[in-house]
Image (cartoon, rainbow, N blue to C red):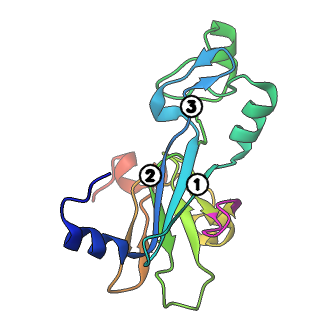
Amino acid sequence: SSVYDKKLFAEFKSVAGTYFLNGLSTCEIGQRLIHPFEAHGFLKSLSFDGKGGLRFKSSIIETPLTIAERRINFPLARGAMSSLGNPIFDALSSSERDTANLVVTLWPLPGNSAVEPMLIVACDNGSPYCINPETLQSIGKLEDRLPEIKGKKMQAHMRMDEARQRLILCSSSFDTDDKTAKGGAS
């Protein structure tokens, strides 16, 4: 192989740190294809040592749904974009695929020792999962560590507010006790 810009390549080799990326794993469960948006999460880490070395690790994020579907080799939830291929199964199955296949964020940021570092991996319209950044193994749901979000359906998109050292999450809910929902004044 050829290096066309030796200075730029030397700079690239000096990079140190870990890059985490979450994405889709296979869209096939048994003999069924599911929509790519509903595939289980495939977490990857690329660790650069600052001397030109790279270590790659990957893992399928194990949610209860992932574990159950791998055990029986058949999809158990139809999701919003896919079906199970059988009207009876579709009617009886959950429409919420808990796949942890979206955004991944390291929390807290390095240097904050108040909380043990973990990766927060988002689901769409569910509870985010906590992942050990070293092993890439699931260590539970975020709601187990942050009781104020327990039972809330979180959106997939989150971000880190570096200035305030806060993880910004968004939930969506419908409150039937809201006065404006009952025709009251706002």
Residue flagged by tag 3: what amino acid is it? Thr
Which sits earlier in the primary sequence, circle 1 or circle 3? 3
* Image spot of residue 79 (x, y percent): 54, 29
| Left or right of 169 in this view: 63 | right
Residue 142 horizontal side relative to residue 70, left or right? left
The residue singled out by tag 3 in the image is 26
The residue depicted at 70 percent of the width and 26 percent of the height is 76
**Which of label 1 and label 3 is nearer to you?**
3
Q: Residues within 10 Å of mark 2 (few under 14, many from 20)?
A: many
Percent of width and height locating residue 56: 55, 58
Q: In screen coordinates, is 134 left or right of 125?
A: right
Q: Which residue does the numbered mark 2 point to in the structure image? A: 156
Q: Callout 2, which amino acid?
A: Ala
Query: How many numbered circles does the render carry?
Result: 3
Q: Which residue is mark 1?
A: 127
- Name the residue rendered at 61%, 42% in the picture: 98
Binning the other alpha carbons within 10 Å of mark 1 as few (below 14), some (14 to 19) or many (20 upward) gives: many
Instruction: From the image, give the main secondary structure of the stretch colored magenta.
Output: loop
The vertical placement of 38 against 104, above or below, is above
The quarter of the displayed image where residue 11 is located: bottom left
Instruction: Looking at the picture, tell me which residue is in the foreground, 155 or 47.
Output: 47
Query: Is residue 136 highlighted in magenta?
Result: yes
- Secondary element at tag 1: loop
- In this image, 29 relative to 47: left or right? right
Gap between marks 1 and 2 measured at Cα: 9 Å
Circles 2 and 3: CB atoms closer than 8 Å: no
Quick one: which residue is furthest to the front in this view? 1
Q: At 51% from the left edge and 90% from the top edge, which residue is drawn?
A: 112
Q: Which residues lie in the magenta part?
A: 131-139
